[in-house]
Amino acid sequence: EPGPTPPAPAAPAPAAAPAAPASSAPPAAAPPSANYPPHSVLQMPALSPTMTQGNIAGLKVKVGGKISAGDVICEIESDKATIGWEAQDDGYVAAILVAEGAQEVPVGRPVLVLVDDPAAVPAFAGYAAPAAAAKPAAAAAS
């Protein structure tokens, strides 16, 4: 009687797993953020569970200015109250994407760009937020 058959070696994982579609996408599909120095895009916050939009009542920052965690970025008016929006991180304001006095800014819309390195600020002079992030549908996800 023949002995037990040794187990077959496990098949190696395919070398070209379908992780390549990202590189085959046209360059235009790359997010605009990829062309800029490291940064964070701050989005319009929901200051209450029911808030879907707000007004930028008063900006407290300017491009190139340093902010620290806890500093008020701007005053946001909702349908219920006016509240100061505080920075969560330290950084330098690289771009202001929504002007002071803007009305009905949807929750989730990019408002401000922060960088860690003040030398990176000039690189954002022509920065525009990705169009997809500016859609009101982004508010429905929160």
Image (spheres, helix red, strand yellow):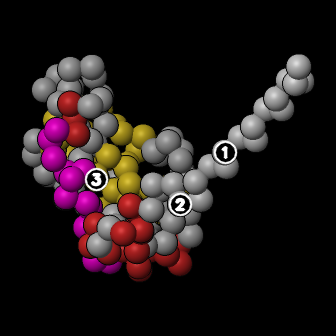
Give the residue drawn at x 17%, y 22%.
80
In which quadrant of the rendered view does residue 127 lie?
bottom left
Q: Which residue is mark 1?
A: 11
Tell me if residue 8 is in the magenta stretch. Answer: no
Q: State the extent of the magenta-drawn residues as a range.
A: 125-137
Give the residue drawn at x 47%, y 56%.
19
Image quadrant where one finds the C terminus: top left
Is disc 2 placed on a helix, strand or loop? loop
How far from the left and from the top, in percent, is residue 115? 49, 63
Is residue 16 shown left or right of residue 94? Answer: right
Is disc 3 placed on a helix, strand or loop? strand
Marked residue nearer the N-terminal end (3 or 2):
2
Q: Which residue is mark 2?
A: 16
> Crowdedness of circle 2 by 10 Å Cα count: few (<14), some, many (20+)?
few
Q: Is residue 135 visible in this depiction of the protein? A: yes
Relative to residue 86, is residue 35 depicted above or below? below
Label pair 3/2, CB-CB below 8 angstroms: no
Hey, what amino acid is under mark 2? Answer: Ala
Is residue 12 shown left or right of residue 79? Answer: right
How far from the left and from the top, in percent, is residue 2? 87, 24
Q: Which residue is mark 3?
A: 111
Label pair 3/1, CB-CB below 8 angstroms: no
Hey, what amino acid is under mark 3? Answer: Val
How far from the left and from the top, in percent, is residue 35? 40, 74
Marked residue nearer the N-terminal end (2 or 1):
1
In which quadrant of the rendered view does residue 61 lie?
bottom left
